[in-house]
Image: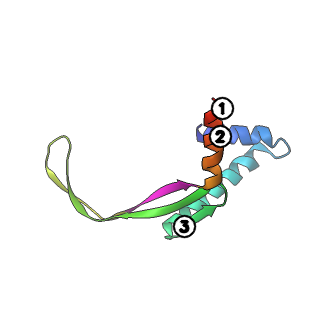
């Protein structure tokens, strides 16, 4: 499912709200999650999962085209960890198919 498909489904499921308001609310949620991660905070949505950051230390890598050594700087990357309830729902739905 893409972002557009998700927003279209929300608009369809919430007919009392104007489509622009639904899209704005969705974008605001994404912005809040991104800003909290950028600030170094963890975001937990009970029953769904949590977003956090993992650190990768600086190291030497290789350019795949030329094979030349490249210095890869230290960085933080976001990750998502599914919650127990989400895992259970997905597992149950997967068993039914």
Given contact means CB atoms under 8 Å apart, are the residues at marks 2 and 3 in contact?
A: no
Q: Position of residue 1 (x, y in %)?
A: 59, 37
Figure check: 73 above or below 8:
below
Q: Is residue 80 magenta?
A: yes
Figure check: 35 above or below 19:
below
Upstream in sequence: badge 3 or badge 1: 3
Q: Please state which of residues 7 and 49 is positioned toward the viewer in this rendering.
A: 49
Q: Position of residue 49 (x, y in %)?
A: 60, 56
Residues under labels 2 and 1: Cα distance?
7 Å
* Residue at position x 42%, y 63% in the image: 54
Q: Nearer the viewer, mark 3 or mark 1?
A: 1
Q: Secondary structure at mark 3?
A: loop
According to the image, label 1 marks what residue? 96
According to the image, label 3 marks what residue? 42
Q: Nearer the viewer, mark 2 or mark 3?
A: 2
Q: Which mark is residue 52?
A: none
Upstream in sequence: badge 2 or badge 3: 3
Q: Is residue 33 left or right of residue 15?
A: left
Residues under labels 3 and 1: Cα distance?
33 Å
- What is the span of residues highlighted in magenta in the rendered image? 76-82
* Residue at position x 20%, y 47% in the image: 63
Could you classify mark 2 by the number of other residues whose Cα lies within 10 Å: few (under 14), some (14-19), or many (20 or more)?
A: few
Magenta part, dominant SS: strand
According to the image, label 2 marks what residue? 92
Given contact means CB atoms under 8 Å apart, are the residues at marks 2 and 1 in contact?
A: yes
């Amino acid at each position: 499912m893409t972002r557009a498909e998700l927003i279209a489904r929300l608009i369809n499921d919430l007919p009392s709200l104007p489509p622009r308001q639904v899209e704005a609310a969705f974008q605001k949620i994404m912005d809040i999650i991104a800003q909290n991660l950028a600030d170094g905070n963890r975001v937990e949505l009970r029953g769904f999962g949590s977003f956090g950051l993992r650190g990768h230390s600086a190291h030497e890598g290789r350019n795949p085209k030329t094979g030349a050594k490249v210095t890869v700087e230290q960085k933080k990357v976001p990750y998502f960890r599914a919650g127990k309830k989400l895992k259970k729902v997905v597992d149950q739905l997967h068993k039914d198919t």
